[in-house]
Amino acid sequence: MPCNTPKREDFPQPAIHSEHMLDRMTEKRRDTAWIKRRLAGKNSRFLLFADLLLAVDSNEDRSETRLRWQSAKDIRKLGVDMDSTMLLGCDREGHAVFAASLSAADATAAPGGMDALKPLVDLRSLAIQGVLSPQDLSLAGMARALAAWHDVARCCGRCGGHTRVFDAGWRRECWACGQEFFPRADRAIIVLITDGTRCLLGHHKRYTHKFYSTLAGFVEPGEDFESCVRREMREETGITIGKITYMASQPWPFPHLLMIGCWAEALTTKLTLEEDELHDARWFTREEVRLMMQGKHPEGLTVPGPHSIAYALIKSFVDG
Ligand SMILES: [Zn+2]
């Protein structure tokens, strides 16, 4: 049966996205005098990460959680090197928004450090809980992705020299050989495979019990995303893919991915699973998936939450 692919304008937007967030002020990143004024400005605010965990304001069970904004003065007190801070952009009022990242050990060693950091939480857990607004979740995701890149870009991949931060956190340069490094967004495809009436969802080995999701894989050098979809789906499930339709993309900050979401038409339905990756994969009807989304599936099977493009792909199938 042919696929009834949804229209792109009807595609649901996941909670983590990048629309209407901040003006990224890319033209100001190299303006050191402007950055310096913003770093000292009383209206500038900072998100703080320690070991990539986010400092938030929250009640004990995290049911009420907000981003915790720090001032430049707060950040300096924690011993943050202001030259390593990251400009996320300016808000509608024109106030600069930065992120700072340091090790929990360094932060807690500073006077008042423990209070400034408590509680520190994993952004993925907050995303799953759905306690942050889409705007705050997306902004914290952008900051986390950038901070995660800095964490692995401290040394030059060419000569092993130390790299230093430039352009308000958007470029690193090797002091020894001058090689430049820019923040990475690794490309991955994420795919809703359908045979027209059912969709294919997989249970990954790394997933918690009874959690099923759309299938995904990394785009390799020299590969376009359609070829990647065909290769990855054949390798993981043995399915031959026909028509592929791009639906939407999503910045995914774990650690710094760009997910390319699409629908794919299955030309075959017999499953041959790649056992190193998938524990299980099954064809599900719309009604079964609807029950999974509502938490009412008779086997207790579940799907990802609304923060993810996987949810948007699955919802577009159920709504179809
Ligand atoms: Zn180098």
Image: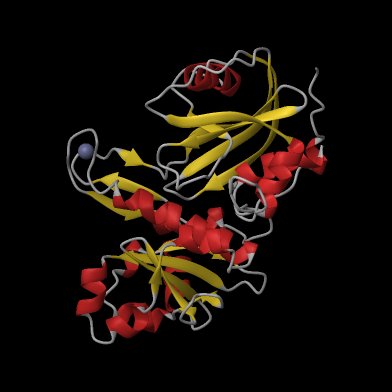
Number of marks drawn: 0
Which residue: 58% across, 74% down?
A: 95
Which part of the image, by quadrant, shows the N terminus? top right
Q: Nearer the viewer, residue 216 or 93?
A: 216
Query: Would residue 318 be found to the left or right of residue 191 on screen?
Result: right
Q: Looking at the image, is 221 positioned above or below residue 6?
A: above
Quadrant assignment, res 32 = bottom left
Which residue: 29% across, 82% down?
A: 114
Whole-percent x, y for residue 28 in the image: 52, 58
Report if residue 206 is visible in the image.
yes
Query: Would residue 252 be found to the left or right of residue 177 on screen?
Result: right
Q: Nearer the viewer, residue 30 or 277?
A: 277
Which part of the image, by quadrant, shows the C terminus? top right
Whole-percent x, y for residue 6 in the image: 80, 34
Which residue: 30% across, 52% down?
A: 151
Query: Would residue 151 be found to the left or right of residue 312 on screen?
Result: left
Quadrant assignment, res 249 = top right
The structure's colour scheme is secondary structure
Whole-percent x, y for residue 30 in the image: 45, 55
Whole-percent x, y for residue 158 in the image: 23, 33
Q: Nearer the viewer, residue 218 or 317?
A: 317
Q: Looking at the image, is 134 positioned above or below residue 197?
A: below
Q: Looking at the image, is 183 positioned above or below residue 16?
A: above
Query: Would residue 117 be found to the left or right of residue 244 on screen?
Result: left
Q: Quadrant of ligand 1?
A: top left
Q: Looking at the image, is 262 positioned above or below residue 16?
A: above
Which residue: 34% across, 64% down?
A: 101
Report if residue 139 is visible in the image.
no
Q: Nearer the viewer, residue 279 or 112?
A: 279
